[in-house]
Image (spheres, grey):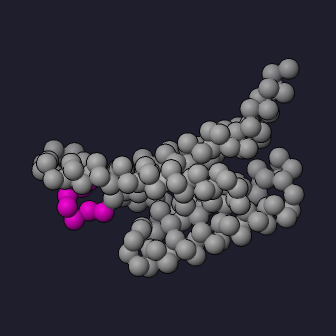
Amino acid sequence: MLTALLILIFPFAMIYAAMSDLVSMTIANRVSLALVAAFPLAALMIGLPASAIGAHFAVGIACLVVTFGMFAAGWMGGGDAKLLAATALWLGPTPALAQYLLFGAVFGGVLTVAILLSRASLAPVTGIVFVDRLLSRDTGIPYGIALGAAGLTVFADSAWMDHAVAGLASAAF
């Protein structure tokens, strides 16, 4: 069960958030709530000490405060803010969080440039609703795509994945 939780919950949430933001320009609250609800269970299952769990929650709350300030300023969407904070909860005060933020910024920059270039050269008349929405100059950038990709990139090389692989290895023998 631990292996399934570690391998499926976090990556599925990242993929779902990215696809949802691409198609509808929204990230449902249930994605972030699932990550927040699954974290304590996963942390306890791998034996994370209470002080470390508290530090992870402190990082998640700090990220939520910062990203909601960014949301209030109009710099990011509310779903993006909640997803980033929920992801920060999982990564905690580790180098993986810094990597996540860096990859999110880089992937977000590439995504933004690609969409702006597409908008400059293509008209929103494809007949595919979400593509036309992306090509509209009045639409924002679905940053959940970059956050999801960054989350998957960092998770693949995280302590969480190490625990999942170890669980699979012990289950196989």
What are the residue bounds of the magenta stretch? Answer: 132-140
| Residue 169: % across, % down | 79, 26
Front one among 5 and 166: 166
Front one among 9 and 110: 110
- Quadrant of the drawing holding the C terminus: top right
Name the residue located 81 percent from the left edge and 22 percent from the top edge: 172
| Residue 39: % across, % down | 71, 55
Residue 3 against residue 29 in the figure, above or below: above
Front one among 158 and 40: 158
| Residue 96: % across, % down | 65, 51
| Residue 118: % across, % down | 21, 48
- Quadrant of the drawing holding the N terminus: top right
In which image quadrant can residue 143 be found? bottom left
Residue 129 in view (yes/no): no
Name the residue located 58 percent from the left edge and 71 percent from the top edge: 64
Name the residue located 60 percent from the left edge and 56 percent from the top edge: 98
Residue 87 in view (yes/no): yes
Residue 95 against residue 61 in the figure, above or below: above
Residue 144 falls left or right of residue 117: right
The magenta stretch spans residue 19: no
Residue 149 falls left or right of residue 135: right
Name the residue located 49 percent from the left edge and 45 percent from the top edge: 149
Residue 29 against residue 10 in the figure, above or below: below
